[in-house]
Image (cartoon, rainbow, N blue to C red):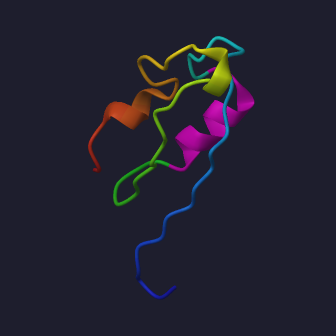
Amino acid sequence: RLGRPIVANLSLGSDHGPHDGTQLFEQMLTSLTGPGKLLAVSAGNSGSNGTAGGAPAFIHAMGLPQ
């Protein structure tokens, strides 16, 4: 309502699932994108598990703001 930018941090995720946009949570994130909206995601790893992140699980994370 104030016409100001807002950022919501959701540091959630896992190594489970197909990471192809078919999961309910991924579909919800997709619904939040669009012109004038930016979805910021972290690029991390699995902590002490030792696996490093690769291409983003959320395809729009590599895009530029519209």
Residue 26 is one of the magenta-drawn residues: yes
Which is the main secondary structure of the residues drawn in magenta? helix
Q: Position of residue 28 (x, y in %)?
A: 65, 41
**Residue 34 vs residue 26, the one in the foreground:** 26
Q: Is residue 27 above or below residue 31?
A: above
Q: Position of residue 1 (x, y in %)?
A: 52, 85
Magenta residues span 22-32
x 57%, y 61%: residue: 8
Q: Position of residue 31 (x, y in %)?
A: 57, 44
Q: Is residue 52 above or below residue 34?
A: above
10 sits left or right of 66 in the view: right
Residue 21: name its quadrant. Answer: top right
x 40%, y 53%: residue: 38
x 59%, y 42%: residue: 29
x 64%, y 11%: residue: 18
Residue 63: name its quadrant. Answer: top left
3 sits left or right of 19 in the view: left
Q: Position of residue 64 (x, y in %)?
A: 26, 43
**Residue 53 vs residue 8, the one in the foreground:** 53
How many numbered circles are shown? 0
Toward the bottom, the furthest residue is 2
Q: Is residue 8 above or below residue 62?
A: below
53 sits left or right of 63 in the view: right
**Residue 57 vs residue 50, the one in the foreground:** 50
27 sits left or right of 3 in the view: right
Residue 6 is one of the magenta-drawn residues: no
